[in-house]
Image (cartoon, rainbow, N blue to C red):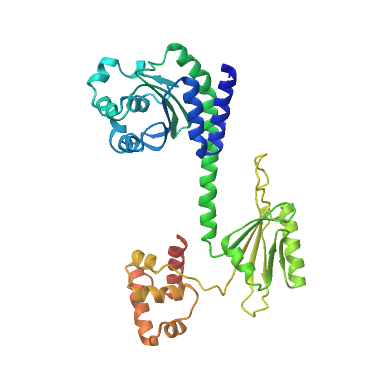
Amino acid sequence: MAVDERMLAVIEALYDAALDETSWPQALKELTDFTGSQGASFWVLDASEQPRLPTFIALNFEPNFIKDYLVNMAGIDPTVQFLVRHPSTPIVHDGLVISEEEKDRHPYYDWHRSYSDTNFRMVGQVRPVPAVQAGVAMHRTRKAGRFTPQDIDQFALLHRHLGNALAIGSRIGTLGTMQQCTTELLDGSPAAVLLLDDRKRLAYANRHASVLSSSSDGIVLSAQGITLQRKQENEKLQTLIAQALLRKTSAGSLFNGTLRASRPSGKRPYLILISPVAKRYSALSALRPAVCIVIADPDRDMQFPLFRLQAAFGLTEAEARLAALLASGEELRLAAEKLGITYGTARTRLAEIFQKTETRRQAELMKILLTTLAMG
């Protein structure tokens, strides 16, 4: 294979790894073949305190060597220390870091030789975003010899593509992390949350929305969107969605529509809020929501985390159970019945809750309890 073809294969492998981190071993294999190396690694460096490598993917090194390196030796590795001090140096090689005479006296290299016969290193590093320092390291044995100026110049030709690939990987990784966090937060919401596209089709539904749909109690969700079982209420809902798509305003404020949806079960009606969302998205975005719909179920059995009330206010478990029932909307007498205690005992516990929460009235207590619970 010609040099140009081999370089193109390396470049393609770097971009593949940016899109899929499981492809880094293949990218490292292409790099070792191209640079005449015997080992390689992809790394992400955290230099905020003591240098460490939270991400480290190695090729042609023993697992025990890598484990010992990451746990015990990375912090005293002269090359790692150089990278920490010089994060903007694109190509780092032994000649910049340490002499052969110094290697013979350095404890890191004594340890290194006990595991591996690699002796020479060449590193390409980038900062795809200000908080991230990452790159690849190529390793050669004593027999293969040091990296020559020609090797370094050739490696430098790949550096721009390495930078672009890691920038893509960083952006995709960040978006993926944000998507995961957002999904977890939305799934933890006690309300059903839907996103519709500009054709009223369902683009996203959180976990509670799926549960609500499966209950078959007045709301139907499908790929085509949301409908209400009662014709008149559904017509109003579709009108509000259409208005949200037009982003109509009232008195200069952004449109927000609300309605109540009846339930065949006879339970209290759902409360539905309809709002427009942003219309500008990346050209390649697969998700293009135009309308957000939030559905609250007033009869949903809320499971309040008692430990949070206990930790925040020093409540006993019994007091926290009573406080949680009150926060869910129960009256004191009914809450006492559910807990299997007398009304007098409930009043005594409520007085203790007032004292510990520094409140005087039940309305004031509800406000602070709901605020605390909402933080989770």
The residue sitting at 30% across, 28% down in the picture is 77
Q: Residue furthest top?
A: 149
Locate the C terminus by quadrant: bottom left
| Horizontal and vertical percent position of residue 284 | 66, 40
Q: Is residue 199 above or below residue 370?
A: above
| Number of numbered labels in the structure image | 0
Query: In the rendered image, which quarter contains the N terminus?
Result: top right
Residue 98 sits in quarter? top left
Q: Is residue 248 visible?
A: no
Residue 8 horizontal/vertical position (percent): 59, 23
> Does any portion of residue 317 appear in the rendered image?
yes
Residue found 35% across the figure and 78% down from its top: 351
Q: Decide: is 84 above or below 360.
A: above
User: From what the image shows, is residue 170 above or below residue 110?
Assistant: below
**Left or right position of 229 against 310:** right
Q: Picture coordinates of residue 331 (x, y %)? A: 48, 81
Q: Position of residue 304 (x, y in %)?
A: 45, 69
**Which residue is at the front of the view, 20 or 295?**
20
Closer to us: 334 or 165: 165
Q: Nearer the viewer, residue 100 or 260?
A: 100
What residue is at 54 percent from the left and 26 percent from the top? 10
Answer with the quarter of the image where residue 48 lies. Answer: top left
Q: Nearer the viewer, residue 153 or 326?
A: 153
Residue at the image position 33 percent from the left and 19 percent from the top: 97
- Compared across the picture, whether 25 is left or right of 50 comes to right
Q: Give left or right: position of 73 versus 361.
A: left
Up the image or down, 117 lies above or below 55; here it is: above
